[in-house]
Amino acid sequence: MHIPDAFIPVGQALVYWVIALIFIALALRWARRSMGEEKIPLVAVLAAGIFAIQALNIPIPWGTSGHMVGAALAAIVLGSPYAGIFVLTLVLLVQGVIFGDGGITVMGANIVNMGVIGGFVGYYGYTGIKGVIGNAYAAAFIAGWAALFVSAILCAVELAIAGTFPLVPALIGLGLYHAVIGLIEGGITAGALYLIASARPDILERPTGVSA
């Protein structure tokens, strides 16, 4: 799902950068207000774990790849969609600048897709579904799957707008692959939440709403 450079025209890429920077600013404000010293180790562990699961790339036709994202897990554990944006931005910066995984000019789009969409869909999917069914782990599974799938669909739409791929093949390719990969993402999200809740329930954040 990491979009490489030249897949999106610079003018369009700048639009995504503007959107990304707005949400990055909100995520930084969340970090200043909510991330005390006691949370720094947890954020570091989440970032390292997300970096690791994103390294498991599955090639998809037409030059892109499919993989897990992890934004839903970060948002759920830390109690805010902005936490998902914060952690994913750190991960994507390291991947793009140091390892060349995803382009620099299009990093704004990658942050929007994986951080913003992943964080908001994952967090509010989790809180909404949990409120209906009352099971945190089932809600985390569904939210993890949905966050990945919606991010992939948005990526396909962006590539179609850019003229890189036709819309329908892009939707089919990215959608089908990530619908399957999302089952793994959902399982990891629910499993990690269960392990954390069992071992250290005190570090789990309660939902904080949309305020950054």
Image (cartoon, grey):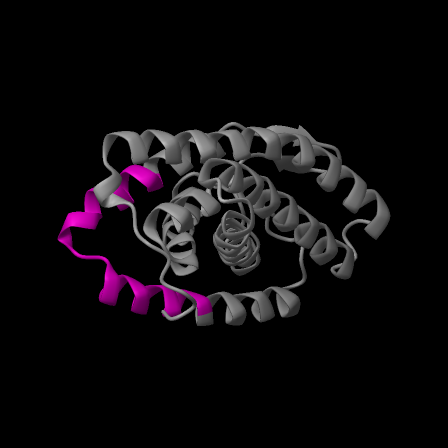
Location of residue 146 in the rendering, given as x and y in whole percent from the top left corner = 61, 45
User: Which stretch appears magenta?
Assistant: 23-47
Q: Quadrant of residue 13?
A: bottom right
- Residue 29 magenta-highlighted: yes
The C terminus: image quadrant: bottom left
User: What secondary structure is the magenta-colored segment mainly?
Assistant: helix
Is 146 a magenta residue?
no
Residue 166, visible in the rendered structure = no
Q: Is residue 111 above or below residue 13?
A: above
Q: Nearer the viewer, residue 60 or 119?
A: 119
Spot the residue most to the left: 37
Identify which residue, 115 or 161, lies in the foreground.
115
Q: Point out residue 95 in the picture as x, y percentages from the top left corner.
A: 43, 42
Give the position of the N terminus as an image quadrant.
Answer: top right
Left-right relation of 148 to 49: right
Q: Name the quadrant containing residue 154.
A: bottom right
Question: Which of 132 and 78 lies nearest the eye of the viewer?
Answer: 132
For the point 52% across and 42% down, the residue is 139
Residue at 30% x, 51% y: name it. Answer: 205
Give the residue drawn at x 57%, y 34%. Answer: 67
Residue 22 at what x, y percent from top left? 45, 72
Q: Is residue 70 above or below residue 187?
A: below
Q: Is residue 169 left or right of residue 132?
A: right
